[in-house]
Image (cartoon, rainbow, N blue to C red):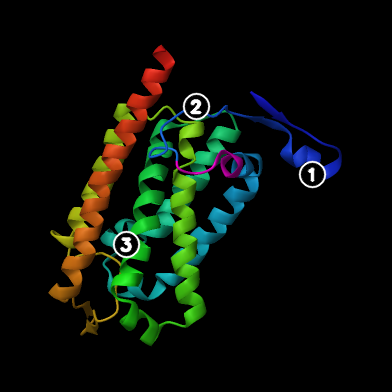
Amino acid sequence: MAEAGGAGALGRFLDGSIPDREALPWYVAPVPAILEDLGLRFAWLVVAVNLAGTAFGFWYYRFQFAFEPLAAWPVVPDSPMATLFIALSIAAWKLGRSNEVLDMLAFFGCLKLGFWTPFTLLAFHDAFLASTPLWLYLFLFFSHLAMAVEGFVIHRYSDFSVWAVAIALLWYGFNDVVDYFIPIVGTTHHTQLPGQYVVDGVIQHVWSIHRVAAAGAVVLTMAITFLALTTRVEKLQRADS
């Protein structure tokens, strides 16, 4: 285990150990080791940033909450829930109370929303830029990519247990169903996109827009499931060697 220490407040802030980096293939651990180590050493700062992002995300969704039934609220703010999951996952690890379910919810959430949001921002860039300030568009784009980076660091402290992967898949699979196909109540609940207007208090899910967002979400859920299970297999192979 690599040790970090130092004098003064910064030393106390950094003091602690981080897990060794396993020799995993690049496609399950694409983040450079130096960046992984930096994030793990500043874990509490990362937790704080994600909690701030969670608060911002719930504020960002305030208008959509007004049009969604209360029963659907848990499945509406996808990105804020993902940043909450990663904050709780890292905090649990730092406190010596690692939780595989939290880890996998964070892994799925950070990778899914970390890639889905930039995908939709690019797919509908003209409409987004017509209604969104450039600074906010860029902030949303790069902050969500940073979420994907966070997700790729989870392998350092999690075992990727199959049962935990299954629970995360159930949650995000359910989320895809109610977001794009069968709503809990009313209309489907995915993030409102440009061109999907509100008429008489109901979000209009224009099919030409809806199908692109749905395709991106479903493909990502499948890909992340494969990636999580591949990470599990790679970890087991190295443990046995």
Which mark is first along the chain, 1 or 3? 1
Which of the 4 image quadrants contains residue 131?
Answer: bottom left
7 vs 231, nearest the viewer: 231
Q: Residue 77 in the image: state x and y as whole percent.
A: 37, 61
Residue 240 shown left or right of residue 15 in the figure: left
Q: Tell me how far mark 3 sits from mark 2, CA to CA.
A: 36 Å
Whether 8 is among the magenta residues is: no
Which disc number belongs to residue 22?
2
Q: How many marks?
A: 3
Mark 3 vs mark 1, foreground winner is 1
Which residue sits at x=16%, y=76%? Answer: 206
Name the disc covering residue 10, or none: 1
Q: Which residue is mark 3?
A: 76
Q: What amino acid is found at the position of numbered circle 2 in the picture? A: Glu
Q: Percent position (x, y) of residue 220?
A: 27, 51
Residue numbers of the magenta segment:
30-36
Which SS class for mark 1? helix
For this orientation, the residue located farthest to the right is: 8
Label 3 and label 1: CA atoms lie apart by 38 Å
Spatial CA span between label 2 and label 1: 27 Å
Indicate which disc, 2 or 1, sits on the residue closer to the N terminus. 1
Mark 3: few/some/many CA within 10 Å (<14, 14-19, 20+): many
Which residue lies at the image location 27% right of the left edge and 40% below the top edge? 225
